[in-house]
Image (cartoon, rainbow, N blue to C red):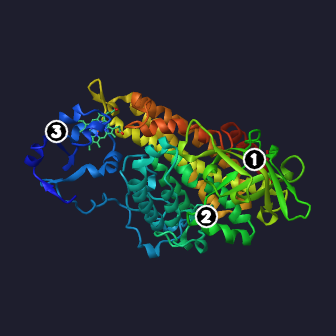
Amino acid sequence: MSKTFTQADVASHKTTDSLWITIDGDVYDLTKFQDDHPGGKKILQRVAGKDASKQFWKYHNEGILKKYQKLQIGSLDTKPKKEAPAPAPKKEAPKPKPAAAAAASSAPAESEALEPFGDQIPFGDPAWYQGHHSPYFNETHAALRAEVREWVETEVEPYVTEWDEKKEVPAHIYKQMGERGYLAGLLGTHYQKDYVKNPIKSVPAEKWDLFHEMLLTDELSRTGSGGFVWNVIGGFGIGCPPLVKFGKKSVVDRVLPGILNGDKRICLAITEPDAGSDVANLTCEAKLSEDGKHYIVNGEKKWITNGIWCDYFTVAVRTGGPGMNGVSLLLIERDFGGVSTRRMDCQGVWSSGTTYITFEDVKVPVENLIGKENQGFRVIMTNFNHERIGIIIQCLRFSRVCYEESIKYANKRKTFGKKLIEHPVIRLKLAHMARQIEASYNWLENVIYQCEKMGDTEAMLRLGGPIAGLKAQATVTFEFCAREASQIFGGLSYSRGGQGGKVERLYRDVRAYAIPGGSEEIMLDLSIRQSMRVAKMLGMKL
Ligand code: HEM
């Protein structure tokens, strides 16, 4: 790839038998590719031997060149050598301290603005990426952000469309989530370093906090694919925490290393054909055997993320009478036999593997009980906060992706002699997107901070209401942004793939966020009901 060519070299390859072009000073040999080019070969032949940068950027986004890197054969001799990254814009804020001296994330007095990071498109990333002060983020967060972004931009983002269409993500990507130490930090609790071969590189395990977890999910979501995010953390992020927090030590020690290192997969199976947000009504039954050593499980679960690929299932079962006090959680292992899974075809999140599961006389050892018998509802409720926060983080980043894609496109697409961004009606759309994203994200930061400070039980009680309200806020924001982005992209977001591809896909993913984990309607109602209930307990005066 280090070959250097002159413009005259390139100009001599201007026929269909040898078709070269340059884009941004790099030379591409499109001779073999021209017949496969989705935009047609004639359009390439018209720019053969020439600089086609302007035409190229009109029709494609950044990901394409990474994906088709092998077409690049070298660079022009006139291309400036890669310089060291440009110095950050001058700002008043003092320089950040060295990593070793980084304070815990939550000490306002020590907070200093971090160096700007990313494209610096206003509202395209959270404010702390743009050199704004934050009491929550320090150098350890910045280091993690850089590490994850680099991985996502080179090994994930260019391929997510392909994976979504194929309805699966290559297994090595999940494996890398384990090898890079990411899975061990996504459990809504401290970093599980004792169970992993490779702890995360850029953050010392003892410094790990919920803001690291938040930004890891946030950066993964920049792919603009709910299917991808759910594939790698969907089942895991909700199925594994109950095991880690409430499982028997012998079971945790046996299964957790395989899961956290990315060799085995786990999911959460609560919803049934007849019980969704109405969890207390589930019917999948677990009967204790006569010798008291096993539960025999029979029943169905529906819309279970990752189920088709999973080795372990954290399953809500009925072990007692009707209602919430007869529910328990069991870790069911596929190897026990009697577990069947089939893929469900859904509107969105295609590569996440939404699954229908049947359990037929599955014999589960009693030690696989998670928490106490008939007290599973409490575990499920604790888990809901973590699940909903995950959904909120993803929705808000997806909203930003819609916004970011739109603002980039609006700056290059011209209609009626003007760039789209020059039309006030388009700026109005962008402004309405940005104000909702920023307001919701700031609420999210506050909620994460409260989770960091409160214990699980206090958080379950006092944050259940706000988190429910924020989940509704996030899904409404996401739906709004997907719609507005789609209007800005027009036809390009109606067809799949290409420049409007992310927006088209995200629009299809919206319902996968607004319905599961508590539907928008249930969330809004709960936000008031739960908050009032707790406030009353705490002495509210009405
Ligand atoms: C390295 C060179 C190129 C590669 C790898 C490439 C690849 C692609 C791909 C994958 C698509 C499908 C849509 C998408 O995924 O974005 C596409 C569409 C297209 N390309 Fe290219 N392309 C190249 C160069 C060019 C150039 C130089 C032009 C113009 C002179 C061009 C014009 C188009 C057009 C008009 C479309 C259709 C856009 C649409 O459907 O709206 N391409 N190209």
Say which quadrant the C terminus sits in: top right
Q: Is residue 168 left or right of residue 153?
A: right
Q: Is residue 183 above or below residue 396?
A: below
Q: Which residue ends up furthest to the top in the rendered image?
A: 416
Say which quadrant the N terminus sits in: bottom left
Q: Position of residue 309 (x, y in %)?
A: 60, 53
Q: Is residue 466 left or right of residue 535?
A: left
Measuring 14% from the left and 56% from the top, which residue is drawn there?
Answer: 4
- Whether residue 455 is visible to the viewer of this picture, yes or no, is no
Q: Which residue is mark 2?
A: 259
Disc 3 on helix, strand or loop?
loop
Q: Position of residue 65 (x, y in %)?
A: 30, 48
Q: Nearer the viewer, residue 452 or 270?
A: 270
Res. 48 mark: 3
Judge the density around disc 2: few (<14), some (14-19), many (≥20) Cα neighbours within 10 Å.
many
> Which amino acid, mark 3?
Ala
Select label 3 or label 1 by which is in front.
3
> Which amino acid, mark 2?
Ile
